[in-house]
Image (spheres, rainbow, N blue to C red):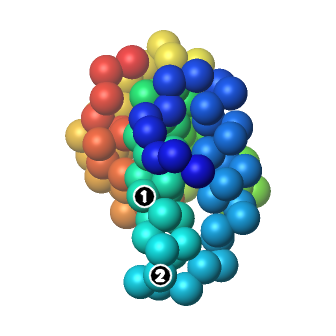
Amino acid sequence: MELKLIKSNEDYEAALARFEELFLAESNTPEGNEADVLALIIKDYEDKNFVIEAPTPIEAIKYRMEQQGLTNSDLAKILGYKSRVSDILHNTRKLSLNMIRKLHEELHIPLETLIKAY
């Protein structure tokens, strides 16, 4: 396969098909080197064309709660404010710095996600 930048969906599909053929190629062989370059070209195309938006802080909290099977009561135990959990999850109250710290420590949500404007 001629190595070139991917500029269309057809190029992308062809690159993926070729990469699949070369996936188990030995390192430091012509096929292995081609697979390495194809991986970089494919990643570049995907980074530009398949952008995934980062979640808002509230989306991240809800997702983590779902992953861990947590209820609003469980979140209230973490935050220490039973009355505020509903307000936070419905976007009527913003997270405080103390809440952000607790969520990061207990639910392991990245700080950069929790401090985003929403």
- The image quadrant that residue 28 belongs to is bottom left
> Label 1 belongs to which residue?
37
- The image quadrant that residue 23 belongs to is bottom right
**Comes first in the chain, label 2 or label 1:** 2
Q: For mark 2, give the secondary structure.
A: loop
Quarter the C terminus occupies: top left
> Label 2 belongs to which residue?
29
Q: Position of residue 104 (x, y in %)?
A: 37, 55
Q: Disc 2 residue type?
A: Thr
Taking depth in this image into account, of 33 and 106 the one nearest to the observer is: 33
Residue at point 62% right, 35% down?
12
- Kindly indicate whether the residue at mark 1 contacts the one at mark 2 (C-beta within 8 angstroms): no
Q: Position of residue 44 (x, y in %)?
A: 41, 40
Taking depth in this image into account, of 45 and 118 the one nearest to the observer is: 45
Residue 116 higher or lower than 66, as above or below: above
Taking depth in this image into account, of 12 and 107 the one nearest to the observer is: 12
Separation of marks 2 and 1 at Cα, in angstroms: 12 Å
Residue 100 shown left or right of residue 33 in the figure: left
Taking depth in this image into account, of 33 and 48 the one nearest to the observer is: 33
Q: Disc 1 residue type?
A: Val
Nearer the observer: mark 2 or 1; the answer is: 2
Residue at point 50% right, 24% down?
7
